[in-house]
Amino acid sequence: MSTTHDNNPAAKLELDGKTYELPIIEGTEGERAIDISRLRPDSGYITLDEGYGNTGSCKSSITFIDGEKGILRYRGIPIDELAEKSTFVEAAFLLIYGHLPNRTELRNWSDSLAEHQMVHENMRFHFEGFPVTAHPMAILSSMINASSCYYPGLMTGQNPTRFDVQASRLISQVRTIAAFSYRKSRGLPTIYPKKAYKYTANFLHMMFSMPYEDYEMDPAAVRALDLVFMLHADHEQNCSTATVRTVASSKANLFASAAAGVCALWGPLHGGANQAVLEMLQAIHDEGDDGSKFIQAAKNKTRRLMGFGHRVYKNYDPRAKIIKKTCDDLLEKLSISDPLLDIAKRLEEAAIHDEYFVERKLYPNVDFYSGIIMRAVGIPLEMFTVIFAIGRMPGWIANYKEIMESPDSRICRPRQIYTGKEINSYIPLDQRA
Ligand code: CMC
């Protein structure tokens, strides 16, 4: 590191006999980046970082993670403090608007969520078009995108009131769409939301009530699911959030950007891992394995221990700690004994003492125990990733807002190193081999 003429630290890069000074940028928690934004114009070189493990794509003030220390904070507030004292709805406001709401703000925010909870009635025709075998994540992304067609006036301009309505509409309706898609997949009548219920209870009502009988909810199950939503609410530049920001950088509307986030989240290496964990635990159970064969297969790389490892956490994921405790408490409260929880604990115990996992700093992530909570609450397996999507919506919206408000924001357009053929000629069809 050196110092530039105006005393700011800079990195020096020597290329083809020339020295380039690259400014060092420091975040509020001391994390540092080399600013290469002038590298290509000045030197002709680009950087290559597949998977972006070393690339900062933005400056953001929403969420802080220290993966080495296992720290996660929303707007500076530690996740364990929020888990103990807050709710998903309050944390959503915090993420999007940058501060904890006062009494009036919280009441207005809750009222706005309640006001926008119904999807447009014509949307029900779209649900009819999906086959019963459709994965709810496919329905969710399609329906979020489709709903933008019903609110065309909200899609233009950066009017703050419009943004507020879009944000609460999306947070509120994602849970309505999710519950409707589940009902559709089971051939059950749709249950409309009730104003009397709070956010998470309302979701469970739409999932499990019947036209002739309201679903009886255990407050511990409602609280556990609310916590699952909150713990998923943001996680800085993960695959789906980076996708939302990329789509938003082209000035696409909020609904289109969020629908893209749902698609990115679906994959088993990202949000789809919670479903994959339960499938893995079930397979281990069905095979009569005590977990040791699976651990060996993971070390041989013929299987992957789902719910383990993280690009950023090289320590225990702080969300996994909270989820594991919530899982134990909930199962005890509901008097449920789940053999899959026993298998999960055995796998964790084996892995955290095994050289392969220790060396690679692989610990349980948020998905390792969350599925057991969802199973206990009665959420079907194919809805697990949808639950993640409902939870992540405030984070996507906060990131969308940040990119739209940033004066530095540019369309995301990475470069590449071309490795294909050099210039080639077109061969007419009758002359090809
Ligand atoms: N089981 C066995 N080996 C693993 C695992 C695992 N779950 N995760 C990583 N490794 C090994 C990997 O094979 C590699 O070994 P080697 O150095 O010998 O080549 C080393 O650890 C580094 O892994 P990587 O694949 O380079 O790490 P990454 O940062 O590219 O991937 C990850 C991160 C989360 C995709 C990966 O750990 C994984 O596939 N985990 C299982 C899926 C999962 O639980 N995903 C949810 C992530 S948390 C929620 C979310 O963000 O969506």
Image (spheres, rainbow, N blue to C red):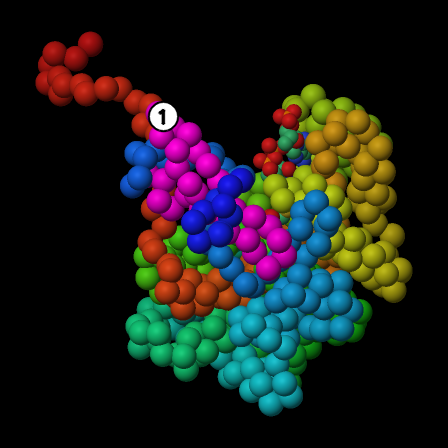
Residue closer to the observer: 116 or 33: 33
Label 1 neighbourhood size at 10 Å, few (<14), some (14-19), many (20+)?
few
Q: Residue at x 26, y 19 (%)?
A: 421
Task: Let me know if residue 428 is in the magenta part.
Answer: no
Identify the secondary structure beneath mark 1: loop
Residue closer to the observer: 339 or 109: 109
Residue 314 screen position, x and y as percent: 70, 41
Residue closer to the observer: 301 or 92: 92
The amino acid marked with disc number 1 is: Gly
Is 191 situated above or below 51? below
Task: Kindly tell me whether residue 331 is visible in this rendering.
Answer: no
Magenta extent: 11-40
Q: Residue furthest bottom?
A: 104
- Looking at the rendering, the quadrant in which ligand 1 lies is top right
Task: Kindly tell me whether residue 399 is visible in this rendering.
Answer: yes
Is 336 situated above or below 199? above
Q: Is residue 111 left or right of residue 290?
A: left
Residue 13: which quarter of the image? Answer: top left
Q: Which residue is mark 1?
A: 17
Is 265 situated above or below 20? below
Residue 389: which quarter of the image? Answer: bottom right
Q: Residue at x 39, y 33 (%)?
A: 19
